[in-house]
Amino acid sequence: MFHQGSFPVAGTPSAVSDPQVRALLGKCAPGAIHFHSAGTTIFAEGDPSEALFLVEFGTVRICRLTADGRRQITSFCHAGDVFGLEAGDVHASTAESVDGAGIRTLHPSDEAGFARTLLALALRRFARIQAHLLLLGRRNANEKMASFLLELAERQGGDGVVHLPMQRADIADYLGLTFETVSRVLRVFKERGIVSLPSVDRIMVLDFDALDALVD
Amino acid sequence: MFHQGSFPVAGTPSAVSDPQVRALLGKCAPGAIHFHSAGTTIFAEGDPSEALFLVEFGTVRICRLTADGRRQITSFCHAGDVFGLEAGDVHASTAESVDGAGIRTLHPSDEAGFARTLLALALRRFARIQAHLLLLGRRNANEKMASFLLELAERQGGDGVVHLPMQRADIADYLGLTFETVSRVLRVFKERGIVSLPSVDRIMVLDFDALDALVD
DNA sequence: CGACCAATTGAATTGATTCAAGGTCCGTGG
DNA sequence: CCACGGACCTTGAATCAATTCAATTGGTCG
């Protein structure tokens, strides 16, 4: 079993394919990689914002809570994603490891051109979040789930077998649903022959067209 | 009645109080102000993204549509707000005048430091949108409406009389509701003595604490 | 095996929507 | 000046999608 909490691991060089993130790495003092075991907090709402974070492996959820405990996950960050960028000097969201994640801390070495690199990243994130607004505000449970599966499938780039590093409650809080509804929608998809569910954390997409039809 | 469409008006200097926007203005060639009458499009999804826009007066809605016509308004922009910033070279959203708006076009004169200024703006917008995600995903109709009223009230900075430049359908599409629900929630607020409704486009907030209690 | 946590499934409930009238406001033209 | 038309808003009743509540099943670890 994984050790609890966060601890440093070997600082192997990042193999990041995204050119924008590579550009960012070139402008940062690369920190050590820390391992955060499943469920642990990387930073919390209100913590001072001092660095950026790069996901080396694993999955991170970025979330916010209402006073009475309802949670909204604003994004999942996978290997190669950068998170922790904030408008102010404290974090507005909490970042938690979903499944055991290796996180590299990036301390910006203040150069010219750094803002430009960061801007590109921020704008890209911005675009994704705007798409998520449409999903949360105007799509039903089936459409939300279809969108989520396609997002993961594209991200993982594979043959159609999608790995779910997060549990049902996380998916629910990302899509603005309950975990029971997530479960029910998956069953409906299975009954319709759109997916099969070889195990609880893997989904095999059999009919991409059906999912595409749902999202648009 | 207003002339249809967009036409130039006198290029009086902007009186913008926000320091970040002022900084941006200093790094841009200030374009002319165009007047866009109510309901007209400033730019549409897919249009090439070539400039930034500053709201001089009036209100602008930024929105996205699903294929079957459902609409999500991602933000309202009021006087002093900048919009039109995009990750790619085309607009991902549509911008429309809500009530007749004066819009100044800003062409970035490419200087050092421009990215930094823009980054600050983008991050601020980013923070607001993230808050909106929580609202759309995890709040009920009353809480959404309370949040919206407080947002407008703060923006207008006044005594508690809030002006609504947009109609019910716009509010609904911003909050992920139907216009009927917006209407009903306002009635409930009135019945509870939280607001009074002197006219259809003005809301007088009588009990800010009640609204605060709803949003958090 | 037994305990525990996650996921599934069913049944009842409910918050918001849909559908359908009315009502209000405002500008236009007789 | 008032009647008319149209756009927007309000309100009510019925419906429905998703939630809530409650078991039950499945999987994992000590």
Image (cartoon, coloured by chain):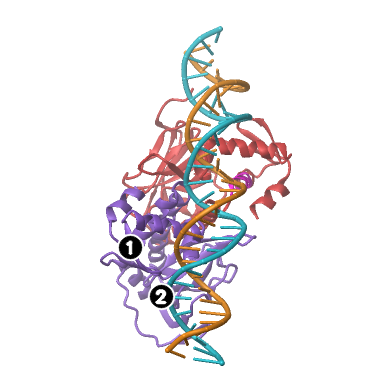
Chain colours: A red, B purple, C cyan, D orange
Name the residue located 47 percent from the left edge and 51 percent from the top edge: B136
Residue A40 visible? The answer is yes
Disc 2 is placed on an element classified as loop
What's the CA distance linking mark 1 and mark 2?
A: 24 Å
Q: Say whether residue B182 is magenta.
A: no
The subunit carrying tag 1 is B
Name the residue located 38 percent from the left edge and 44 percent from the top edge: A66
Name the residue located 38 percent from the left edge and 74 percent from the top edge: B27
Q: Which residue has dot 1 on it? A: B196
Magenta stretch: give its range: A140-150
Please, what is the dominant secondary structure of the magenta stretch? helix
Q: Nearer the viewer, mark 1 or mark 2?
A: 1
Disc 1 is placed on an element classified as strand
Expressed as whole percent of the image width and height from the top left, the position of residue B204 reads: 31, 64
The subunit carrying tag 2 is B
| Labels 1 and 2: the sequence-earlier one | 2
Expressed as whole percent of the image width and height from the top left, the position of residue A25 reads: 46, 50
How many numbered tags mark residues here? Answer: 2
Expressed as whole percent of the image width and height from the top left, the position of residue C11 reads: 59, 30
- Three-letter amino acid code of the residue under disc 1: Ser
- Three-letter amino acid code of the residue under disc 2: Gly
Residue A13 visible? The answer is no
Q: Quarter of the image for the C terminus of chain A: give it.
A: bottom right
Task: State left or right for residue B64 relative to residue B10.
Answer: right
Q: Nearer the viewer, residue A41 or A174?
A: A174
Task: State left or right for residue B52 relative to residue A195.
Answer: left
Expressed as whole percent of the image width and height from the top left, the position of residue B208 reads: 28, 56
Q: Say whether residue A142 is magenta.
A: yes
Q: Which residue has dot 2 on it? A: B58
